Image (spheres, rainbow, N blue to C red):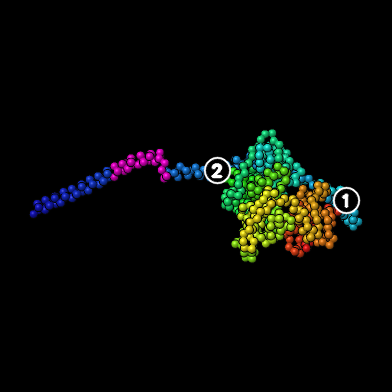
Amino acid sequence: MQKKLSNHGYLVFHSRLNVLLLVTAFIFLAIGLFTACSRKDEQAAKPKKIESAVSSQPAVAPVTTQPQTQTDWNTAIERVAKKAIPTVVHIEVTEYQEVVNPIFPFENNPFFQQFFGIPRGPRKFKRELKGLGSGIIMDAQGHILTNNHVAGGASKIDVLLANGKHYPAKLVGADPKTDLAVIKISADKPQPFATFGDSDKVKVGQWVVAIGQPLGLSQTVTQGIISAKHRTGIMNPSSYEDFLQTDAAINPGNSGGPLLDLQGEIIGINSAIMSQSGGFEGIGFAIPSNMALQVARQLIAHGKVERGWLGVSIQNLTPALVKSFGAKDLNGALIADVVKGGPADKAGLKRGDIILAFGGKKTKDADTLRNEVAVTPIGQDTKVTVLRNGKQVELKVKIGNLEDATKFFSASVKDRLGVTARPVTKKEAEKYGLRPQQGVAVAWVDPEGPLGRAGFEVGDIILQINRHAITSVQDLDTLTSTLGPRQGIMILAVDHRTGNKASVQVVVR
């Protein structure tokens, strides 16, 4: 029995030993197989890597193109600056003004002589004003585009190029209506010049770069986006405005410098900022390149800008007017009045017509129409689509010359203000210390008219109406046509007897 038990134990022991050996062998076999498979997989993977490297499978594309795209974006502004900086100039202007001595009116007054002992002095004295701005070289001949408020009234203009060279410049022409001017330097060799882009293709939100001399800091580059388009009513209601709005940093001294897209093409001329502090607050305005280039070419060719004239007074539509006239929406310009004998009158346009399209282009509002008419060649027959009595009517109008409009408008100024006006002469501008194209002189006064009762005399000079600068007889006509019946206005004028400036409250007819 004991032997059986021993044999049984022996058998059991050997059975357990065999099982353990089998398990151990299986484990080693499994490890060997796993290692072999791993090596096989690794060897199999190597050819695939080589094959992927030489093939052009889409899965590999991000690896090859992503770094290139990222590099382009990182260096975009750098490339724009490198391309544009040689074409941007620093402009220093000096203006000499002859100013009436403010003490002169009181010199012979016994009261002031007795109590204040006012010394006698010259009736007039000269003062020197200096300013800074920017500009863009337009061509190899040295024509430079800048703002009118930078160079328009300058007595002396100095230009500093990006390469450090200084040149004197002369004024070729200026246009206060768009705040643009062209000056020219005579360099010893052709100059690098800028490339202009199409401002009509600019999109809100696209990246832009501004370059200029803010506060005299040359070759300053800033970046931002286009915040809005077609901004009007920013500076002067009688000017031609269609600003691009940007948040690229623009400060005093940037005026006349370029606003560029990321291809390095000029899409705007920096002109103004909206600020309570006088410095950058994120709202800047640039003149669209298409408008600037058209004006600059006329200034170079003729020294002035000739503009088309339609002969109508227009206004924007309101929801009430849309309902009243049966229009579809707010797009269009309502004809409030037609100048008798003017181009529109001869073409059959009538008061109450809504201009929907001009020259084949849809009319968005009154300002858009005004700008389109201005750039239309004089004498050109242009198709005008109007809404009249709920139906569309097509007419053809022969565009007139805005300079010829003065004789038509003068009657309105005479009736409503009781005066007629003329341009300020060069002698008068020097006498009263005025800049070129600043103000208009009174040529005739009705003693019983609004200005006559306020004390205006022949020879007095009207500088502003309701804080809007008057730069020509056309300005006076345009502003007068926008005034309501018996509206109160504030006129800033120069007394031709003393040369003193004063503001006068007047109620128009």
Residue 203 image position (x, y, % from top left): 58, 51
Q: Nearer the viewer, residue 294 or 147?
A: 294
Residue at position x 29%, y 45% in the image: 34
- Quadrant (top left/top right/bottom left/bottom right) for the C terminus: bottom right
**Count of numbered circles in the view:** 2
**Badge 2 amino acid:** Thr
- Horizontal side of 287 relative to 426 (left or right) equals left
Residue 41 image position (x, y, % from top left): 32, 43
Residue 289 image position (x, y, % from top left): 64, 47
Secondary structure found at label 2: loop
Which residue corresponds to mark 1? 119
Most prominent secondary structure in the magenta stretch? helix
Is 404 one of the magenta-colored residues?
no
Question: Looking at the rendering, which quadrant does residue 415 occupy?
Answer: bottom right
Q: Nearer the viewer, residue 16 or 324?
A: 324
Circle number at residue 75: 2
Give the number of the mark in front: 1 or 2: 2
Q: Is residue 395 above or below residue 296?
A: below
Q: Can residue 171 be seen at all in this image of the molecule?
A: yes
Say whether disc 1 or disc 2 marks the residue closer to the N-terminus.
2
Q: Nearer the viewer, residue 168 or 330?
A: 330
Q: Residues within 10 Å of mark 1 (few under 14, many from 20)?
A: few
Circle number at residue 41: none
- Quadrant (top left/top right/bottom left/bottom right) for the N terminus: bottom left
Residue 147 image position (x, y, % from top left): 69, 47
Secondary structure found at label 1: loop
Residue at position x 60%, y 45% in the image: 197
Image: magenta residue range? 34-59
Residue at position x 53%, y 45% in the image: 73
